[in-house]
Image (tube, helix red, strand yellow):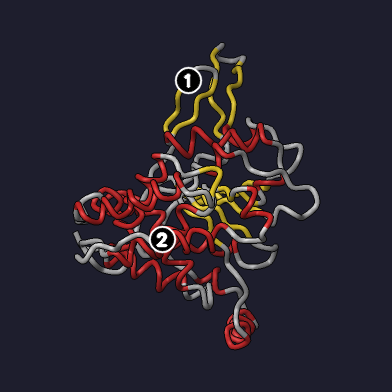
Amino acid sequence: MTFSLIQDIKENVKKVIVGKDSVIELVLTAILAEGHILLEDLPGSGKTLLAKSIAKSMGGSFNRIQFTPDLLPSDVTGFQFFDMKTGDFHYKSGPVMANVLLADEINRTIPRTQSSLLESMGEYQVTIDNETIPLPRPFFVIATQNPIDLEGTYPLPEAQLDRFLFKLSMGHVTVEEELQILERFQTEDPFKRLGSVTEPDEIVKMSEAVRSIRISDALKKYLVDIIHAARTSKLFSVGASTRATIALMRSSQAFAAVQGRDYVIPDDIKFIAPFVLCHRLKLSEKERLTGNRVEDALAALMKNIPVPAV
């Protein structure tokens, strides 16, 4: 199966989003790998617009939840209500019933409500009063969070962090890119003219096809070596789970597809690994005291792992 539609989506999103080609590619990689993304950045950096543009380009449904301290789990998943006319209980769907869900400022709500997304993200379903309701496919969560040092934020629990395939940052644009944004938005919002280039069923087919992207035994051993090195290294007090191992393989396959290849190369794994692992690893106390970052520790670790010649 060809993945040319992915390039069509990318080019379509670029009609709205300026200067973030790498971020767009990583979002599309996560969608193909059937994963979810945590975007950490300051307000106003384009996170919401990116999510809406991706959903519109996919031809899928889009919902947004503004997470606040008083938000309840039922505000996310929906609830059962009693219909007095029929005498039956019915499910009132929550915003989670969408192809693309923007969980905006997820770390501004309490952990109980944060955790209400766990089943949806891991099993593509919600359970309400012992009734299991499947989610639409594809189902993709883009959760945004403000930097944890901002007032009124709650850190995400480790179990939920592990459900996110990637943790990304939009970052600032260059002077030239910001001038392009002003030019593009001066007279009208380009998102209003954005059309769809595919439909959700095609995304599902491509996600299934990604599993057939070739990855050699040597490369599987290479990515497992990275995981085990992080688990046993004194640089980290918490290593990555087996879920992370599978995530690294699947996202490497998906990234190869986004690059137009039907096989994985070592550079795919080296590029993807920090996005998959950094939010799952915790520095040891010694490393934290020295001021090192997880990204730097992982990069130093990976330099000492032999890369297979394939």
Give the residue drawn at x 50%, y 17%.
130
Q: Residue 131 shows which numbered tag? A: 1
The residue under label 1 is which amino acid type?
Glu
Residue 289 location (% of width, % of height): 69, 55
- The reply to whether the C-beta atoms of the residues labelled 1 and 2 are less than 8 Å apart is no
In the picture shown, does residue 201 fall above or below 79? below
**Who is closer to the viewer here, 285 or 150?**
285
Query: Closer to the N terminus: mark 1 or mark 2?
Result: 1
Q: Secondary structure at mark 2?
A: helix
**Who is closer to the viewer here, 95 or 245?**
245
How busy is the neighbourhood of tag 1: few (under 14 within 10 Å), some, or many (20 plus)?
A: few
Q: Quadrant of the N terminus?
A: bottom left
Provide the residue designation for mark 2: 302
Residue 161 location (% of width, % of height): 55, 44
The residue under label 2 is which amino acid type?
Met
In the picture shown, does residue 19 fall above or below 132? below
Q: Quadrant of the C terminus?
A: bottom left
Residue 287 location (% of width, % of height): 61, 55
Q: Is residue 246 left or right of residue 282?
A: left
Give the residue drawn at x 45%, y 32%.
125
Most extreme residue toward the top is 87
In the picture shown, does residue 114 fall above or below 302? above
Residue 105 location (% of width, % of height): 67, 51
